[in-house]
C-alpha cells in the first residue's frame, strides 16, 4: 500500500476559481513534505517544502498546509490560471532515510477558460 | 530542467532490444537517481548513486542496470526490454545535505512493443 495517498485523482476548475488538493501519508518518522508541480511532458518541479514545525507555506498563489498530528497536508491554489493545469504530487521523506522520497500518485488539475 | 538533461526524450523499441537512457547534470551534485513513472502510480526509484563509486538498487531494479561514468553522468540500461517497461523515466540529482532537494530532468518516454 502506498504510504502517500492523494485526492482527488483529478479535477476540473474554471479559470479564476480556487481549489484544494489533499494528501494523507503514513510515512514515519516524518522529516518533511513537499509539493511538486509536473507539467505535461516535463519533470516535477518543487513548489514547497515543509518540516514538522511548519504548518503553512506559500509560494505565490500556492499555499500548502501541514498537520503532522493527523498526517495530512493540503495544497490550495488561489485564482487559478490556465498555466496551473498540471499534475500536483505530494512527496514525503522520513527522518531515518538518506533522502529517499515516497511519492503520491498525483492529482491532475485541468483549468478551463 | 536545463540543469538536468536526458537523452533521448522519446524512444520506441522492440522486445528483447538493449536500450540505454542517458542523464547529464550541471548542478555539481554528487547524488543521482533514476525513477520510472506509470499512470496512476507515484514515481518509483530504480537505482541511486551517491558518488561515482557508490551505486545502489532501488525498489524496482530488476531488469535494469546503471553506470555512473562521472559525477555529472548517470546512465540507465535495459538489457533486454520487455513491454511492461513501457513508462516515463526520470533522472534526478540532489545535494547531500538537508533537505536533499531533488531536481528532475525532463523525462524519457520509452515504449517497448
Image (cartoon, coloured by chain):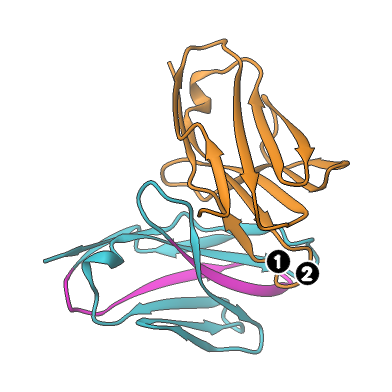
Chain colours: A cyan, B orange
Indicate yes or no whether the magenta region holds residue B37. Answer: no
Say which chain tag 1 marks.
B
* Image location of residue A107, percent across then percent down: 37, 60
Q: Circle 1: is it few (<14), some (14-19), or many (20+) Cα within 10 Å?
A: some
Q: Nearer the viewer, residue B71 or A112?
A: B71
Tags 2 and 1 on a common chain: yes
Q: Does B21 sit above or below residue A58? A: above
* Image location of residue A87, percent across then percent down: 38, 58
What residue is shown at x 54% (from left), y 18% (from top)? B82
Disc number placed over residue B77 in the picture, else none: none
Q: Is A50 on the left-hand or right-hand side of A96?
A: left
Q: Nearer the viewer, residue A94 or B24?
A: B24
Numbered disc total: 2
Magenta stretch secondary structure, dominant: strand
- As drawn, which residue projects farthest toward the right? B53
**Would residue A32 be visible to someone looking at this image?**
yes
State the SS at label 1: loop
Q: Is B1 on the left-hand or right-hand side of A63?
A: right
Disc number placed over residue B100 in the picture, else none: 1
* Image location of residue B109, percent across then percent down: 45, 34
Task: State the extent of the magenta-drawn residues as a range.
Answer: A14-37
Q: Quadrant of the C terminus of chain B?
A: top left
> What is the distance, in whole Å, between disc 2 and disc 1 at their CAs?
5 Å
Question: Residue tagged by mark 2?
Answer: B97
**Mark 2–mark 1 CB contact (< 8 Å):** yes
What residue is shown at x 56% (from left), y 53% (from top)? B104
The quadrant in which residue A9 appears is bottom left
Amino acid at each position: 500500500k502506498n504510504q502517500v495517498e492523494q485526492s482527488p485523482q483529478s479535477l476540473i476548475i474554471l479559470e479564476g476559481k480556487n481549489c484544494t488538493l489533499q494528501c494523507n501519508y503514513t510515512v514515519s518518522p516524518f522529516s518533511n513534505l513537499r509539493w511538486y508541480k509536473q507539467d505535461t511532458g516535463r519533470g516535477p518541479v518543487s513548489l514547497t517544502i515543509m518540516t514538522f514545525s511548519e504548518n503553512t507555506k506559500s509560494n505565490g498563489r500556492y499555499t500548502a498546509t501541514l498537520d503532522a498530528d493527523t498526517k495530512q497536508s493540503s495544497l490550495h491554489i488561489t485564482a487559478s490560471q490556465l498555466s496551473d493545469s498540471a499534475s500536483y504530487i505530494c512527496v514525503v521523506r522520513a527522518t531515518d532515510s538518506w533522502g529517499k522520497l515516497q511519492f503520491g500518485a498525483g492529482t491532475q488539475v485541468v483549468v478551463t477558460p | 530542467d536545463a540543469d538536468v538533461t536526458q537523452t533521448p526524450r522519446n524512444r520506441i523499441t522492440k522486445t528483447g532490444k538493449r536500450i540505454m537512457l542517458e542523464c547529464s547534470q550541471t548542478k555539481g551534485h554528487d547524488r543521482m537517481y533514476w525513477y520510472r513513472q506509470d499512470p496512476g502510480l507515484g514515481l518509483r526509484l530504480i537505482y541511486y548513486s551517491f558518488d561515482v563509486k557508490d551505486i545502489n538498487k532501488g525498489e524496482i531494479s530488476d531488469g535494469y542496470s546503471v553506470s555512473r561514468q562521472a559525477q555529472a553522468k548517470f546512465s540507465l540500461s535495459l538489457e533486454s526490454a520487455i513491454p511492461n517497461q513501457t513508462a516515463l523515466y526520470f533522472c534526478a540529482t540532489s545535494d547531500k545535505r538537508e533537505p536533499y532537494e531533488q531536481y528532475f530532468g525532463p523525462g524519457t518516454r520509452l515504449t517497448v512493443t
